[in-house]
Image (cartoon, rainbow, N blue to C red):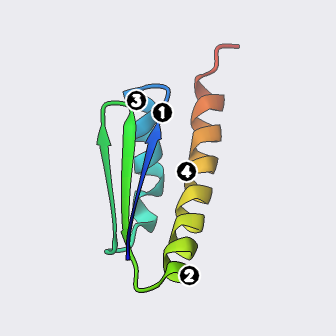
Amino acid sequence: MTVDLEHRCASPEEACALVAAVAPDDPAYVAVSVEGATIRVRVRAGSAASARATFEDLLAGFAVAERTHRGATVPR
């Protein structure tokens, strides 16, 4: 099973920051790329349950990185 996901970020800088934040957690069966402000993720899994677990982990990491990045760049 192969599952693709695209996420549009606020800027190319944000996209790169989010990918860098989750990169250490990417196993070999996950491919992540950035094109402009768009993050593309491809997961290859042996089952739907495995794909779901991988995406849950990845999306949780992206959510934390996104909140952290946006919080760090908001003018005060």
The amino acid beneath tag 2 is Ala
Q: Mark 1 — residue?
A: 9
Can you give x and y, in whole percent of width and height, for residue 40 in the image? 36, 49
Label pair 4/3, CB-CB below 8 angstroms: no
How far apart are the alpha carbons under marks 2 and 3? 32 Å
Judge left or right: residue 15 versus residue 31: right
Q: Mark 3 — residue?
A: 13
**Foreground mark, 2 or 4?**
2
Label pair 2/3, CB-CB below 8 angstroms: no
Q: Mark 2 — residue?
A: 49
- Going from N to C along the chain, the mark reached first, 1 or 4, is 1
The amino acid beneath tag 4 is Phe
- For this orientation, the residue located farthest to the top is 76
Label pair 1/4, CB-CB below 8 angstroms: no
Can you give x and y, in whole percent of width and height, for residue 50 in the image? 51, 81
**Foreground mark, 2 or 3?**
2
Judge left or right: residue 75 versus residue 6: right
Can you give x and y, in whole percent of width and height, for residue 7 in the image? 46, 42
Label pair 1/3, CB-CB below 8 angstroms: no
- Going from N to C along the chain, the mark reached first, 2 or 3, is 3
**Quadrant housing residue 41:** bottom left
**Mark 4 closeness class: few <14, some 14–19, many ≥20 residues within 10 Å:** some
- Going from N to C along the chain, the mark reached first, 2 or 1, is 1
Residue at 63 percent of width and 49 percent of height: 64
Of helix, strand and loop, which one carries label 4?
A: helix
- Camera-side residue: 52 or 70? 52
**Mark 3 closeness class: few <14, some 14–19, many ≥20 residues within 10 Å:** few
The amino acid beneath tag 1 is Cys
Residue at 53 percent of width and 65 percent of height: 55
**Foreground mark, 1 or 3?**
1
